Amino acid sequence: MAISHQEVKHDPRLEGIIQRVLTTRFFEGEPAEIPVPPSGAIYLNYCGPGRMRIRFGDGSVREATPLYCGGQLVSEMPVALLEPPMQIVGLEFTPTGFHQVFGGDCSRLTDRMVDLDEIDADFAAVLCARIEAASAARHSEIMQQAIAERLSVNSRTSLAEWAVARIRQTRGRVSVAELADEMNFTRRHLRRIFARQVGISPKQFAKIVQVNTVLAAMRPAQPEELQRLALEYGYYDQAHFIRDFTRHVGQNPTAFLASGDRFLDMYLGRKTHC
C-alpha cells in the first residue's frame, strides 16, 4: 500500500493562525482505513480525486466533499476511508485560528465534518476553482494564500487565546477555576467563550494537551518508562493514564509503541514525514 504522509512548511504570514500543513498521498493499492485521533485543532481539508468517507463512532458514514472542515474531536475516534488515487491537503489551525478567520461558533463543528460552503459559500467557490485550475503540487500554497487574503480583510481577536497558551504552558495541568480567576472571568463565561472560539471546553482541550505532551516524550524502545512519564506529566496512576491514552489514540501505549504507526506519529506531532 503506497501511502505517504508529510508535514510541509506553512506560510509565515499565517503564524498564529495555521500551525501545520499536512499532506497525504495515496495513488495505488486497495482502499485504506486511517484512524483520526483528537489533535486539539480544527482542519480545513482538500481531498481528491478519489473517494473519501469518514466513519464516525456511532457507525454513521459521511462522504467527504473536496473542501470540508473537520471540527474538534471529543467523542469516539472517527476513521477515514480512502480509495485511490487520493491526495489530501490539511491546514491545521491553531486552537483559536479558525475562529479568527471564519468567526461563528466553532462548537457547531465539534465531532462533525462540515462542507466549507456551509460556512462561506462564496469563499468556498473561489478557493475550489483556484485549486482545480492548479497542479496538485500547488494545492497547499493556494489554500494558504486564500486564508491569508481573507485574514487581511476579515480578522478577529480571540479572548480564548490567552487561556490556550496557559493550558499549553502548564501541559494541561491547570484547572478551569484557576484559568477563570487569572482571566477575571466566571467559569461559565470562560467555558462559553472557549467553546465558541476553540470548539471544545477548556477541560477537554487540557486533556488533549496532557495526553499529547506524554506522547511527544514517549520513545519506542522504552515502554518501561510509561509509569514514570504518567506521573511526571500529571497522572495520579498509570491506569488513569492508560485509560486516557487508549481513548485518545485508539490503542494502549504499549501497543502504540509496538505498532510503529507512521501516520499517527506525524498526525500527533511526533515526526514530520513518513
Image: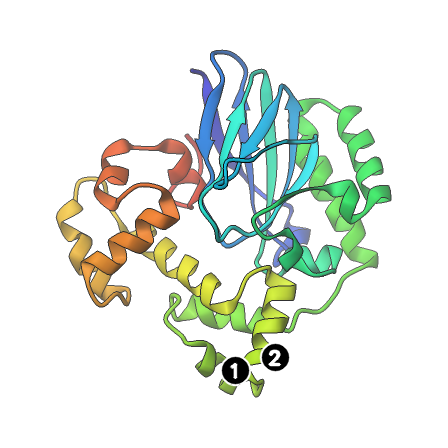
Q: Position of residue 1 (x, y in %)?
A: 42, 15
As helix, strand or loop, the secondary structure at mark 1 comes to: helix
Quick check: marks 1 and 2 in contact, CB under 8 Å?
Answer: yes
Front residue of 186 and 27: 186
- Residue at 40%, 38% in the rendered image: 264
Q: Report the residue marked by disc 1.
A: 180
Residue 108 x/y as whole percent: 66, 55
Residue 193 x/y as whole percent: 63, 72
Element carrying mark 2: helix
Q: How is the image coloured?
A: rainbow
Q: Nearer the viewer, residue 103 or 8?
A: 103
- Relative to 257, is 55 on the left or the right? right
Q: Amino acid at mark 1?
A: Ala
Query: Which of the two labelled residues, at mark 1 and mark 2, occupies the earlier sequence position?
Result: 1
Residue 77 is left or right of residue 8, and the answer is left
Q: Residue 252 in the image: state x and y as whole percent.
A: 26, 44
Return the residue at label 2: 189
